Amino acid sequence: MKYYIIAGEASGDMHASNLMKGLLAEDPDAVIRYWGGEKMDEVYRSARGSSGLVYDYRETAVMGYVQILSKLGTILQRARFCEDDILEFNPDVVILVDYPGFNLRIARYAHNNGYRVFYYIAPKVWAHKEYRNKQLKRYVDRLYVVFPFETEYFASKGIKYVYKGNPLLDAVDTSPQLTESREEFFAGCGIPDCPYIALLAGSRNQEIASMMPLYMRLADVLHRDRPGMRFLIAAGPKRSDKDYEKYIGRRDYVHIIHGRTYGVLRHAEAAVINSGTASLEAALIGTPQVVCYRAGLLIGLIVRIFIKIKYVSLGNLILDKLAFREILQSEFTLANVRREVERLLDDKAYVAKMKEDYAEIRSRLGGKGASRAVARSMIAELVALKDRKV
């Protein structure tokens, strides 16, 4: 069968690449055309010896209203090209991976032109923009959700869904970075073995600009009080040293590490993480953490008005309680972050309880093999549809 897959950011590229592995394993004759990134392209090139990549997600990924407005013409042009490309490719199904601003437009177009539409990793309508549920009901044939709390929510909205567990378990547990020794990790980083704090500032310019100044002040005070402590920045996908160096300056106790995020988390004493998928990855790896986030004044006001959830971190949402602290907006101060990091370093009972909660998070996400189970479910539905037409 022919599959047209659209992912629009780094996490979507990762999850879509694992889904593609499942599709290729379950359907040996699969032909896939895709919007995504290097992970998806690596999977398909390895299987087919050629690329099916239409556009790299980095050409269209945006964040924030100002950036969206500045790139609106480009986004609309890409959408029109995508629509034409779908018609030319004529797939058996269009599979949309997260990225709702772009993908819901494509869902409408594909549905209106008679294509089967699957949506993998649902838009976070349970947090905000519930009006998108109308689009999901009208234009999406099957929604594949990845969090246990989503099943009750979408059932209450009358939206057809499938839940096969969370693919992040596979991505984390099969990573080579979780099997390398501490010695191998530090040798790969090119620095001596040392205790360190992991710093994850996000992957977008706005996130880095918001987080890094306070991260560096935190590094200064902790290094002063704990001279042996270093700080490893897990660089975002495709970010360069220059994106961070202007904030680091001459601090020789701060290091930028590329392509080893899971390793950075695994060997860290604690992690300070910009909210996002990384906080759930840290929970699955077992890293003591605090989640921090600060948006601009306008975005912060919008968040307070429209966001309907108690927590911003996926792990805390899964448990419906604070497994780890979230320091957000006006509370994101040096004093608050420093106090929490020192507790993570010194309070063994506090960390032990956090890791108990981590185990419960992992348990609620289901077992391994979610990506292939989703692929199998998709193929079964498409085959059943073809059989009904015969």
Image (cartoon, helix red, strand yellow):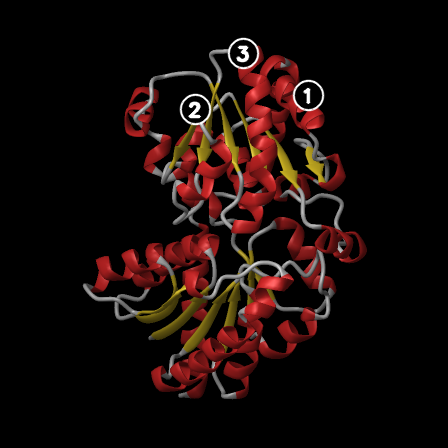
Q: Position of residue 154 (x, y in %)?
A: 68, 62
- The reply to whether residue 180 is in sight is no
Q: Which of the labelled discs sits on residue 226, or is there none?
A: 3
| Residue type at numbered disc 3 | Arg
Is there CB contact under 8 Å for labels 1 and 3?
no
Q: Is residue 22 above or below residue 294?
A: below
Q: Quadrant of the C terminus?
A: bottom left
Lower sequence index among marks 1 and 3 = 3
Label 2 or label 1, whichever comes before in sequence order: 2
Separation of residues labelled 3 and 2 (CA atoms)? 18 Å
C-alpha gap between disc 2 and disc 1:
21 Å
Going from N to C along the chain, the mark reached first, 3 or 2, is: 3
Q: Which mark is residue 275?
A: none
Asked if residue 307 can be seen in this view, the reply is yes
Q: Residues within 10 Å of mark 3 (few under 14, many from 20)?
A: few
In front of the other: label 1 or label 3? 3
Q: Nearer the viewer, residue 24 or 225?
A: 225
The residue at 43%/60% (across/down) is: 58
| Amino acid tagged 2 | His
Dot 2 falls on a residue whose secondary structure is helix
Write down the residue under mark 1: 339
Mark 2: few, some, or many residues within 10 Å (few <14, many ≥20)? many
Q: Quadrant of residue 46?
A: bottom left
Amino acid type of disc 1? Arg
Closest to the observer, 270 or 15: 270
Q: Specify the farthest residue to the left.
A: 49
Residue 156 horizontal side relative to residue 289, left or right: right
Res 267 label: 2
Query: Does the residue at mark 3 contact the one at mark 2 (Cβ under 8 Å)?
Result: no
Q: Please provide percent x and percent y for residue 377.
A: 46, 63
Image point (69%, 35%), residue name? 326
